Image (cartoon, grey):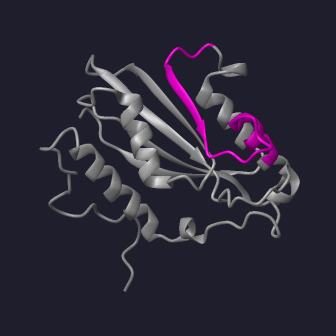
């Protein structure tokens, strides 16, 4: 595995549609040549694709809210089918409850190998089977946000899932842990 990483990010209202376009490599991002696959899943009936879903999130989430969450993760070079590996990982993280866009990007790495990674952009509002329209879906009386994504321990859960999933194709890989903690920056408090 070249550069193992997994991170959880939050996206503000107003950035959802643009980020979905970036992941797919369309619009002003059409000159990107590293997009290998784009998969939209678990969308409500009113959304034909994730572009439409995240445009609706930008328009209907509260103004100071978040339109999406994102898990960005490396895909091991050892994975025989990187797209299937990423889809399997997305299923382990989100199941079939949360609407998402999964984009697999592949470009040359600084060591001459492949820098293959994925972006899992999703809403923390589950598709609960109710037939909400786009406006109501994002309101308090619509699809209620799953508060598990506000829990600090969820980041560790996702990292543990990632490590386990990497070992499915690279059994000898273990996350690096520094021998000594990184020094704190700033004044020493009494």
Residue 16, quarter of picture:
top right
* Quadrant location, the C terminus: bottom left
Residue at the spot 33% in from the left edge and 50% down from the top edge: 162
x 43%, y 70%: residue: 153
Q: Residue at x 40, y 42 (%)?
A: 88
**Residue name at image x 32 percent, y 22 percent:** 114
Q: Is residue 41 magenta?
A: yes
Residue 63 seen: no
Q: Residue furthest left?
A: 172
The one nearer the camera, 146 or 106, is 146
Where the N terminus falls, by quadrant? Answer: top left
Q: Is residue 49 above or below residue 136?
A: above
> Residue 71: image x %, image y %?
49, 48
**Quarter residue 49 falls in:** top right
Q: Is residue 22 left or right of residue 64?
A: left
Residue nearest the viewer, comparing 153 with 48: 48
Is residue 139 in view from this perspective? yes
Task: Give, as a single range, the part of the protein colored magenta.
Answer: 31-56
Residue 117 falls left or right of residue 66: left
Residue 104, percent from left and from top: 47, 29
**Observer-nearest of 40 and 158:** 40
Q: Is residue 57 left or right of residue 10?
A: right
Expressed as whole percent of the image width and height from the top left, the position of residue 82 reads: 36, 29
Q: Magenta stretch: residue 49 in it?
A: yes
Q: With respect to residue 119, does 44 lie above or below?
A: below
């Amino acid at each position: 595995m070249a550069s193992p990483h997994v991170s959880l990010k939050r996206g503000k209202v107003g950035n959802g549609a643009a980020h979905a376009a970036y992941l797919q490599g369309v619009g002003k991002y059409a000159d990107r040549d590293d997009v290998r696959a784009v998969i939209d899943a678990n969308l409500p009936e009113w959304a034909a694709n994730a572009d439409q879903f995240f445009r609706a999130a930008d328009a209907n989430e509260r103004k100071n809210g978040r339109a999406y969450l994102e898990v960005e993760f490396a895909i091991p070079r050892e994975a025989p089918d990187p797209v299937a590996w990423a889809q399997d990982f997305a299923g382990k993280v989100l199941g079939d409850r949360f609407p998402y866009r999964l984009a697999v990007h592949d470009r040359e790495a600084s060591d001459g190998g492949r820098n293959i990674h994925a972006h899992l952009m999703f809403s923390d509002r589950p598709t609960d089977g109710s037939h909400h329209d786009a406006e109501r879906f994002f309101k308090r009386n619509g699809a209620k946000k799953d508060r598990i994504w506000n829990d600090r321990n969820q980041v560790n859960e996702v990292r543990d899932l990632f490590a386990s999933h990497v070992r499915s194709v690279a059994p000898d890989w273990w996350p690096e842990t520094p021998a000594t903690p990184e020094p704190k920056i700033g004044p020493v408090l009494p």
